[in-house]
Image (spheres, rainbow, N blue to C red):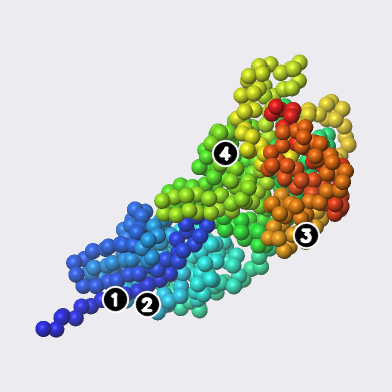
Amino acid sequence: MPLKERSTMFASVLSAAILGMEVHPINVEADVSDGLPSFTMVGFPSAQVKEAQDRVRTALKNNGIALPPKRITVNFAPADIKKEGAGFDLPLAAAVLAASGILKSEQLQKVMMAGEISLNGNIHAISGILPMIIRAREEKCRFCVVPAENLREARLIPDMKVIGVKDLNEMIQYLRKPESYHIEEAEILLAENKEKADFCEIKGQESLRRAVEIAVSGFHNLLMIGPPGAGKTMVAKRIPGIMPPLTLEEGLELTKIYSIAGLLPADDPLVRSRPFRSPHHTCSAQALAGGGRNPRPGEVTLAHRGVLFLDEMPEFSRRSLEILRQPLEDKVIRIARVYGTYEFPADFILCAAMNPCPCGHYPDMNRCRCTPAQVSQYQGRISQPLLDRLDLCADVTPVGFEGLSSRRIGESTDTIRERVTKVQELQRERYKNEGIQFNGELKGSQIEKFCQLDKEGKNLLQMAFEHMPFSARAYHRLLKVARTIADMDYCEAIKKYHIGEALSYRAFDKKYWN
């Protein structure tokens, strides 16, 4: 006997899951067939995604759309990727509507959707929209449907049509007639916000200002050691201002990171200035590195292309500090989980500040009240391998009365930035075929190739190596700093006085860590 013909309808729409920094396309498939009324979801959905069935069913009912009393099955493919977040509400609703005959399945072809639905049918913003739009462009989608609150962020990609919807009725309207949606195109401008804090406000500290300029010019890491109130934090907050403005590509890269982290402001979703991240010393290792059940960017990634400032560095936990070792070398941070290993970009300047002892006045024994054991224990909180990754160390001394009361105005942030920009352009031109941009990124054979010393410079370096306990890593970092100092003098060869100045920023190995 022939089998009885069953009534069934199927529809599918594209969405996306974000794992780390990677965006994976997800097909949300819905099947409506005869049988006992039920709503089943398969394809490795999390508990949060499973809750979407109740939100969607109630939202449709409150908008006058009744789902048929049939068996509804929803699959999220591929099934080996765990689906997290409320962003699957919108594609789930669209797929079910198409499978129920309210929409046509062809209307969902080559369309990517994401958004959260409330019980009254309103559609709310979600994080991670920008990387989803970029992936939709790679998938050659016809257009994307996103919450209206995310529209400014989504339209940062100019060559991808994006439809912003406020509720379910608008979603249905524009899926039926996408050509009826029109919005004025706006030009993407990347103008860096005016920096209020200026270097001209800093009194004295010429040697520290010089160290900061070297660090930014070559993208080197910097450690500032000095007593409380000497101006370490004040200088650190002005470092992003002397860095060259972000390019459009860098701005979009940072916007993608901040979108995934859910930190973009709704009124201006484009990151326009270099990030300056200053986590408190109680910051956990996970918050610093990133992670979680579904890994998200941490402070080291949020500081990408900018500055990570660690004030009172020895007060951070040893575990948090040791996490920095890998990203300082590789410029990425890798987080291993059961379902895979995730990579996050972490190309930043580490700027750290610390007191030389618990009271802050060592080695001034007239004011320091710490015992040698307390000083040693305090400084020992920073391991030698981490110290080796800090290219420069600036000794910060308090500014005297004459310096503080002087009306002499120092160099402005704009003046310093002009010099830094020229030196960085020189490096970019030199390394255009090397896959790097700055001296701080030089590796192995590249150091031998580009850090050529004259005879006097080589003799001075040999003498210093024999008398100072340099590791191989510290030796190479010293050469990279000398390369930057030579570039600031527009010298192709590294000379004796370039080596001498670079050595002066490694003297902390002798002065503090004996």
Q: Earlier in the sequence, mark 4 or mark 1?
A: 1
The kind of residue on which mark 1 rests is Met
Numbered mark located on residue 430 in the image: 3
Q: Is residue 401 left or right of residue 49?
A: right
Q: Secondary structure at mark 4?
A: helix
Q: Position of residue 307 (x, y in %)?
A: 67, 46
CA separation in Å, label 2 and label 1 = 9 Å
Q: Which residue corresponds to the image point at 36% horizontal and 55% vertical from the top-left?
A: 46
Whether pointer 3 and pointer 4 mark residues with C-beta atoms closer than 8 Å, the reply is: no
The kind of residue on which mark 2 rests is Ser
Quadrant housing the C terminus: top right
Q: Is residue 169 left or right of residue 425?
A: left
Image height of 330 relative to 204, above or below = below
Quadrant housing the N terminus: bottom left
CA separation in Å, label 1 and label 3 = 61 Å
Q: Which residue corresponds to the image point at 55% horizontal and 66% vertical from the top-left?
A: 134
CA separation in Å, label 2 and label 3 = 54 Å
Numbered mark located on residue 374 in the image: none
Residue 356 versus residue 415: which sits nearer the camera?
356
Q: How many labels, in total?
A: 4
Q: Earlier in the sequence, mark 2 or mark 1?
A: 1
Whether pointer 2 and pointer 1 mark residues with C-beta atoms closer than 8 Å, the reply is: yes
Q: Earlier in the sequence, mark 2 or mark 4?
A: 2
Local packing at callout 2 (Cα closer than 10 Å; few below 14, some 14-19, many 20+) is many
Q: Residue furthest bottom?
A: 2
Looking at the rendered image, the disc whose residue lies closer to the viewer, 1 or 3, is 3
Question: For residue 380, which quarter of the picture?
Answer: top right
Q: Position of residue 406 (x, y in %)?
A: 87, 32
Looking at the rendered image, the disc whose residue lies closer to the viewer, 4 or 1, is 4
- According to the picture, the residue beneath numbered tag 2 turns out to be 105
